[in-house]
Amino acid sequence: MKKLPTLHGKTVVNLFFEASTRTRTTFELAAKRLSADVLTLNIAASSAVKGESLLDTLQNIEAMQCDMFVVRHQQSGAAEFIARHVKPHIAVLNAGDGRHAHPTQAMLDVFTIRRHKPDFPNLQIAIVGDILHSRVARSLIHALNILGAADIRVIAPRTLLPAQVETLGVRVFHDIKQGLREVDVVVMLRLQRERMEGALLPSEQEFFQRYGLTGERLALAKPDAMVMHPGPINRGVEIDSRVADGPQSVILEQVTNGIAVRMAIMSITLGHHAHPVGEEV
Ligand code: CP
């Protein structure tokens, strides 16, 4: 079925204060496939650039009788802040806030892993690269712990790891060759230059030499290891093109799965309100 009626009559607003390709478009597609009306506010062309405050912008959109805000913001805690300030009937979904959380990405990531390797208690998973600035890593580690993953590893230089990262339930490796040994899943992360303050890295070339995923390094993992990346990928910085486009890569499958997972999240969040009051369900 191309479309489901679940959110017929509902209005979903995409509020993306930070750049996005995958999350914004898959949320939009997901809402449309559930028959919602979808509004994507172009922040750069909105009155926010004329000095309107975030709360004033929100109140004006709220006045348009919306039902759901999907929020991406560069500040950690933004979605939670918005949820506390909008009317209680409006559902707020976090589409990524600063370096804090990206919960729908984690859900599509574990959905993708489960389709290939469903036995989480026996899985070894390595997350490689800029863990310090990564909301994707934080949410994924959280989800993998909930699912009882046996061995969650983070592989990064000391400068790209949060303090006391072990307390999240992970094992730390600074040597990628040791960290990738016999893993089932390799999750590569982008260097988040836009969140870096000061010089945390000598150069992108040196980062690739020490932490880039090449075919040779991937061969240290299990022969059927999956290669994942939330995107956007930086070829030749954290991942070699031949690996990103190779047979073990599920990077584009993650994007496709994002639609189904976001449809499910929106249905669960708003679906129980989808029938007019008084109508038998
Ligand atoms: N994975 C992800 O959040 O990508 P976008 O920034 O393009 O939405």
Image (cartoon, rainbow, N blue to C red):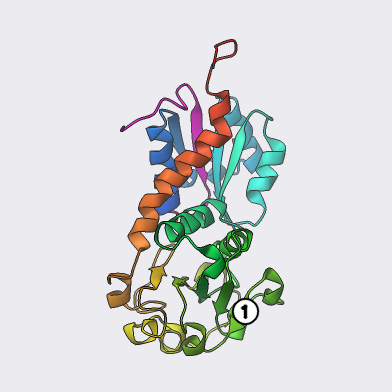
Where does label 1 land, which residue?
171
Q: Is residue 34 magenta?
A: no
Magenta stretch encompasses residue 14? yes
Q: Position of residue 253 (x, y in %)?
A: 35, 57
Instruction: Left or right? Give the position of 138 relative to 191.
Output: right
Q: Which residue: 72% across, 77% down?
A: 164
Extreme residue toward the top, this view: 278
Q: Is disc 1 placed on a helix, strand or loop?
A: strand
In the picture, residue 220 is in which quadrant? bottom left
What quarter of the picture does the C terminus occupy? top right
Q: As rendered, which of 148 and 16 lies closer to the eye?
A: 148
Please identify the quarter of the rendering in which residue 204 is found: bottom left
**Residue segment shown in magenta:** 1-21
In percent of width and height, residue 86 lies at 67, 34
Magenta span: predominant SS is loop
Residue 55 rendering spot, x and y as whole percentages:
66, 39
197, 244: nearer the viewer = 244
Q: Residue at x 66, y 42 (%)?
A: 82
Image coords of residue 15 (percent x, y): 52, 42
Asked whether residue 55 is in view, the answer is: yes
Q: Is residue 53 visible?
A: no
Q: How many numbered marks are there?
A: 1
